[in-house]
Image (cartoon, rainbow, N blue to C red):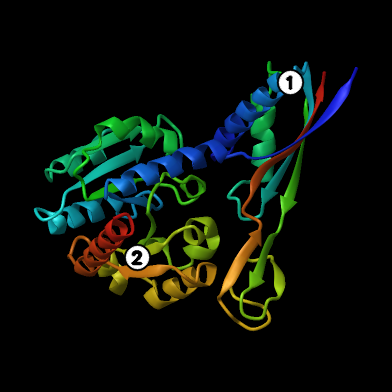
Amino acid sequence: MTKKEILVLEDLLGSNKKIAAEIREKLSQKGILTINLMSSPGAGKTTLLESIAERLNPDYKMAVIEGDIETERDAERIRAKGIPAWQIITGGACHLEAKMIGKLFPEIPPDLDFLFIENVGNLVCPASYDLGENIRCVLLSTPEGDDKPKKYPKAFTTSHWLIITKTDLVPLLPFDIQQAIKEAQEVNPSLETFTVSALKGTGIEELVGQLISALKKLRKDNA
Amino acid sequence: MHELSVVANLFEILEEKVKEQNGKRIILVKLQIGALAGIVPELLATAFDIYKKDTIAAEAELKIKTIPLKVQCKDCQKVIIKDDFIFICDHCDSTNLETLEGTEMILEKMDIEI
């Protein structure tokens, strides 16, 4: 038997990173700002998107890619707002990968302003996969507790924005917003934070304002 | 639980390399997994054992080297190994830290029979 040692030093997620970089490049050149939303199930990603859609409409065009293990329900909710939506049913997989977004590429209208990707509800696995987004957002809903950033550090260290959702429930819960922000910024000091209640409409204006600023910056940088 | 997806990617690389080398089978696979890679080494090992059946790596041994999170403070320049994932300098309390190691997920080397 002849044994041969081969030094490889290849990134196990290298192929995903390569596809993600291509997606980011193409969408950015078209002037489309792409946002990847990650959170645990039920943190309010779809409700937040419904609320954002109401504010952006009719001045800005948005579309949504929905990732779920099963059902078309989330895409149907978004379509009901008059927003184009595609449902990726992962059939058991706990996260979206860049190649799944790449497959939808031909269907994405070139005149979009914002493309939101709602990841599969899971605070662990999606954090390892770049989808070609410009902004990665992690949502933390108040019923989940303010101790989550340190329990699930990767979702928070890899995100640009933290959106604390369901703030209307704070009076009922032992959730300290300042403590949650402090814990999140300890694992990621550059994290920008927002506090919203999509149901009451609180904080949405500010969030949408920052999305529009980010879109303008993207277009200026790619001009 | 995305360890099985990671192993599927690993096998794409392994198969390509074995083909390049005209190898017969894989004897050893050595990975480097960062503490903040978002991967549980034990689950990765289980996923590898499930996946390897009836492949060129059916009898391969898997070695996983865990890489601690290593950061450098951009203010006091000290290099620190972080056991927690709190991005605050242990020496000067700065939050201006650069990650040097600990997020990687790498196929370091493989031994094959040719």
Task: Name the residue rendered at 13%, 42% in the picture.
Answer: A80
The quadrant holding residue B109 is top right
Left or right of A163? Residue A107 is left
Task: Name the residue rendered at 17%, 53% in the picture.
Answer: A53
The answer to whether residue A94 is visible is no
**Circle on res. A33:** none
Coordinates of residue B51 in the picture (x, y in percent): 64, 25
Chain of the residue displaying label 1 = B
Pick out the residue farthest to the bottom.
B92
Pick out the residue farthest to the right.
A1
Disc 2 packing (10 Å; few <14; some 14–19; many ≥20): many
Quarter of the image with the N terminus of chain A is top right
| Mark-to-mark CA distance, 2 and 1 | 47 Å
Secondary element at image label 2: strand
The residue lying toward the viewer, choosing from A92 and A16, is A16
Coordinates of residue B62 in the picture (x, y in percent): 76, 34
Q: Are marks 2 and 1 on the same chain?
A: no
Chain of the residue displaying label 2 = A
Task: Identify the residue position indicated by label 1 in the image.
Answer: B58
Against A22, is B97 above or below?
below
The residue lying toward the viewer, choosing from B59 and A36, is A36
Task: Name the residue rendered at 39%, 46% in the picture.
Answer: A24
Task: Identify the residue position indicated by label 2 in the image.
Answer: A164
Q: Label 2 sits on what residue type?
A: Ile
The quadrant holding residue B90 is bottom right
Against A223, is A183 above or below?
below
Disc 1 packing (10 Å; few <14; some 14–19; many ≥20): some
Coordinates of residue A43 in the picture (x, y in percent): 34, 55
Q: Label 1 sits on what residue type?
A: Ala
The residue lying toward the viewer, choosing from A128 and A202, is A128
Pick out the residue farthest to the left.
A58
